[in-house]
Amino acid sequence: MPDPTFGYVTPENLALFTDRYELTMMQGYVETGHEPAATFSLFFRKLPPDRGYLVAAGLEQIIACVEDLTFGQRAIAHLEAQGFHEGFIDRLAGFDFSGDVRAVPEGTVVFPNEPLVEVTAPIFEAQLLETLFINQVGFPSLVATKAARMRDVIDRAGDGQSLVDFGSRRAHGTDAGMKAARAAYVGGFDGTSNEAAAEAFGVPAYGTMAHSWIQSFPTEREAFEAFVDVYGEESILLVDTYDTVEGTALAMAVAEERGVDVVGVRLDSGDLVELSKEASAIVEDASIGADDGADDGPGVFVPSGVDEYFLAEFLAAGGVATGFGPGTSLTTSDDAPKLDAVYKLVAVQQDGALAPSMKLSAGKVTYPGEKSVRRIEEGGEYVRDVLGRRREGGPGRELLVDVYRDGELVYDLPSLDDVRDRRAREVRRLPEAVREIEEPSTYPIEVSDGLERLTRELQEELVAQVGD
């Protein structure tokens, strides 16, 4: 029988979810006695296409990883088989994170070069976290941003329509499907179709029916009757198996015959704008599920091919719906499927104190030292951020908060609903032009005088060293 954990990351092999060169460097640190404290900064250099902002997500997963990060028997056996040295493996067997972590709370909007996470720890420990932290932050942030853009389109052009994650089957693996469902909720979705995600994260689960239900009965009428008999006014009937308009009329007739006041209809194909208008008119004429908003009944539900661009076009064209079920485009963030997040050393211990550090690679110059990100707000709207040196001070609200201090978790994890509410506040406070879904304006990021000066001086020093 195959191992049921095959291909999955579990607490037994979590510590191995790293790139080989991290372990190679860690062994080198141990065997050369080179173990200074260091600060690593996790950030991205540019936003994905058509993104005016990114919604930070994944911090709770980072914390869960740190709490579970130990080298147990399974991991140790693998590393022994790979030929790592006995002294290094002994160190790993006693691994326990002892450093500091600062991070931007989930649901916060962030921009290029701003740290999402900063780690200060012995370099042996901090090095191990690179692959894991980038992995846990990048994908959820992409999906949360995609979801937030859809919710923002509805907030600005819609009528409170619901959004439900329908994308688990198209996600790139079960882990991705779970993370996408959570990130979608952070981004403003109302729930998920995935029952495992609903159980894990405490978010609402929703579902309708598939064409197979309709096709399995001798007639469409019998399929509708059977479903309504079981689910009553909670029924959402898929009406486009044969003819959408006729199917909608039949659904209303069945509901009336069964004495059910409210049923909804689901449209899955065809000219969704025009069909939604016709279906909505039939529903309203039957005086059930009138299209007065998402809270008045199931109404008209549209799950096919939905993303923020579809929503904008659908609503602008007068399409009528009480809810949408984005799938593939959400869980793959299909128009922007990658975030080039990096985890760079920005300070290293010298003579007992952290000294700023940077590299000079062409096109990849990073700002040195521990950072501060301060957000300036005027009249209820964010106007600019200031990227500076830690403890430099200045106007605005500091975004980075303490998560770990000396290896102890000091951050009170907010509820998922609180994270979702933060995202809503954050997006609403952005300038309208930055929120556009196509060709958004660039949000202003200033670099403080202190960080500019430090960067310039360190560059000059490093160039001089190269010359020597």
Image: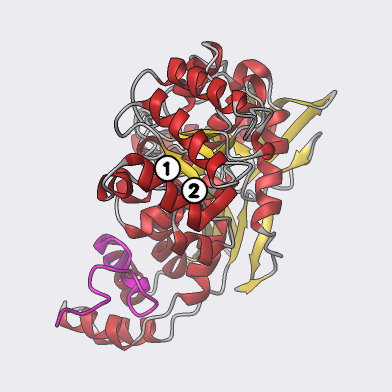
Query: Dot 1: within a 10 Å radius of its alpha carbon, few (fewer than 14), some, or many (20 or more) residues?
Result: many
Classify mark 2: helix, strand or loop.
strand
Q: 40 left or right of 465?
A: right
Label placed on residue 42: 2
Q: Position of residue 131 (x, y in %)?
A: 37, 57
Q: Amino acid at mark 1?
A: Ala
Measuring 69% from the left and 36% from the top, which residue is drawn there? 426
Residue 347 shows up from this direction: no
Which corner quadrant of the image does residue 167 belong to?
top left
Q: Name the residue at 66% across, 50% down.
A: 419
Q: CA distance from mark 1 to mark 2?
A: 7 Å
Query: How many numbered circles are shown?
Result: 2
Side (left or right) of 86 relative to 408: left
Mark 1 touches mark 2? (CB < 8 Å): yes
Q: How is the image coloured?
A: secondary structure
**Residue 304 drawn in magenta:** no
Quadrant of the image containing the C terminus: top left
> What's the amino acid at mark 2?
Leu
- The x and y percentages for residue 360 are 39, 35
User: Residues in magenta?
Assistant: 1-24
Residue identifier under label 1: 341
Q: Position of residue 222 (x, y in %)?
A: 36, 47
User: Which of pointers 1 and 2 lies earlier in the amino acid sequence?
Assistant: 2
* Quadrant housing residue 8: bottom left
Residue furthest to the right in view is: 379
Q: Which residue, as the protein is rendered here, is positioned at the far top?
A: 317
User: Which residue does the image show at 38% across and 35% down from the upper left?
Assistant: 329
Q: In the figure, is residue 438 to the left or right of 106? A: left
